[in-house]
Image: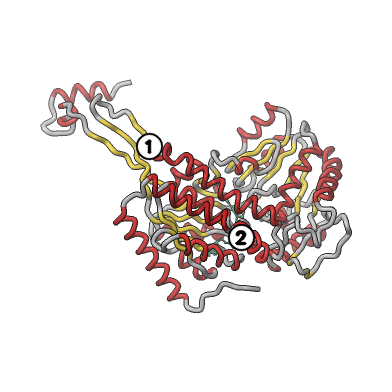
Amino acid sequence: MLKISNPDLNAATSNMCAILERQKRAHLAHGPLSLDERTEWIGRLIALLVNNSDAIADTISMDFGNRTRELSLLGDVAGSIGSLKYARAHLEEWMQPAIHDGGFPDAKASVEYTPVGVVGVLSPWNFPVNLTFAPLASIIAAGNRAMIKPSELTPRTSLLIARLIGEAFDESEIAVVLGDTEVAVEFSKLRFDHMLYTGSTSVGRQVMRAAADELVPVTLELGGKCPVIVSATAPIADAAARIMTIKTLNAGQICLAPDYAMLPEEHVEPFVTAARLATSAMFPTLLDNPDYTSIINERHELRLRGLLEDAKARGARVVEINPARETFGAHRLGYRMAPALVVDPPADCKLLADEIFGPILPILTYKTVGDAIAYVNGRERPLALYYFGTDAAEERHVLDRTQSGGVTVNDIMAHALCESLPFGGVGASGIGAYHGKSGFINFSHARAIFHQSKAPEAEYALRAPFGEPTRQYLALAISK
Ligand code: NAD
């Protein structure tokens, strides 16, 4: 397996510090990027993706063993281009100062969204291009420079990203540094003006600790267990098909994948049958099927198999969906694993503890929707919550009584594909959000600017000696 390693951590760290200093100096010397410059940088990023779409899809596939070509083109290439084009189309409007009431007729109060400077980006392996380039849409729209450390788990893709960015941008504009976890740790200690980390919640905590030492503001795009509440009113076959579509997309290695589903007891068997049918229709075979993505590496495959073994050992019913009855193991397309449903796993099952991040769906039962809500609220706040049903009052109740980064009703993940909506978590699933205008604001500093009035009260109100005008003002201000 190709590995990114750094024989000399000190040299790697000095190199990162030098690039950061260069970018900071360039930012100060140049001042905020103009509308035209931001548009041109975004155009360069779009061109890079368009011109290299095939190479990107091929390279991600090599890193995964097999990564569905259409998924890479849709999720990594087209998805990134969509974010960049949306930012380009709205940039001028977003950059306008927001005019506020200055209190006096001739005072002027406004908020200008100014670039923060240099943003550090630590990106993960599961959508290695999208989770680097979609944030860049917001970061560059806000007029910043960026330093990126892509994942060591997709080494070929990270190398490709470094080469393509290196060809299109000067290091003082956007730079990519490569390295393993040790380099990532040093990267997270740098004095960026803002840091974006996308990855697991446990590493997110470490990144935030490192950033705290330098008071670097962070955006954390983390993971967690995204619940699906299937109402008694939901059309079961439709819900099962939509849930399994995303549970098997990228083999479930998606932060927004449905982690577990909760159904009324009497709907479980129809759901299992429908999920089986829908999955078999998508994947009549699995082992050599290019539409099915492999598990990223052996460690993750063993972790996922371990979760299934643990569930079986604790008496849960495991329904493997393997229509052609293929035998899995070491394979030319990497680490392949059949989708599986786990019906009614006991509460102490490992499957129910941490984010699954693979093609396994636990199915839990509930008696009342209140029980399902209580189960969700007994856990960390998820990145997404999904509700399937046709009862508007019940849907409102679920939304009002739970918290999550985002919500899709009657489908999975769709809210995150709507570029104008903020994409981010809450609590343990993240801090901050990007996509659309939210991303522009997230990577900007909202600078308050006030032009003072010429009215005498504006000048004398705070100046001693305090006399009758101040007393009159206070009498007015301190009143009910
Ligand atoms: P990963 O292992 O690729 O790590 C992500 C980045 O963190 C990499 O660049 C890596 O070099 C760096 N890193 C690793 N250890 C570090 C450390 N100790 N200090 C600083 N940086 C470090 O990715 P992963 O964590 O396996 O990604 C999967 C997780 O990411 C899942 O939990 C998933 O839900 C989450 N995720 C979240 C989103 C989102 O947008 N919220 C998107 C994708 C994935």
Which residue is found at the position 78% from the left and 70% from the top?
330
What is the secondary structure assignment of the residue under circle 1? loop
Amino acid type assigned to the residue bearing label 1 in the image: Gln
- Of badges 2 and 1, the one in the foreground is 2
Amino acid type assigned to the residue bearing label 2 in the image: Ile
Location of residue 210 (image quadrant): bottom left
Quarter of the displayed picture in which ligand 1 can be seen: bottom right
On screen, residue 429 versus residue 194, left or right, reads: right
> Can you say whether 154 is above or below 369 in the image?
below
Residue tagged by mark 2? Answer: 56
Residue 119 image point, x, y percent:
43, 55
* Mark 2 CB within 8 Å of ligand 1: no
Label 2 CA crowd tier, 10 Å (few <14, some 14–19, many 20+): many
Which residue is found at the position 56% from the left and 49% from the top?
81
Given residues 155 and 214, the one toward you in this image is 155
* Mark 1 CB within 8 Å of ligand 1: no
What is the secondary structure assignment of the residue under circle 2? helix
Residue 417 image point, x, y percent:
61, 43
The Cα–Cα distance between marks 2 and 1, rounded to whole angstroms, is 35 Å
- Quadrant including the C terminus: top left
Which residue is found at the position 72% from the left and 35% from the top?
369
Residue tagged by mark 1? Answer: 96
Between disc 2 and disc 1, whose residue precedes?
2
Location of residue 391 (image quadrant): top right
- Quadrant including the N terminus: bottom right
Given residues 381 and 420, the one toward you in this image is 420
User: Would residue 17 be seen by someone viewing this image from the given angle?
Assistant: yes
Residue 298 image point, x, y percent:
71, 68
The furthest residue to the bottom: 7
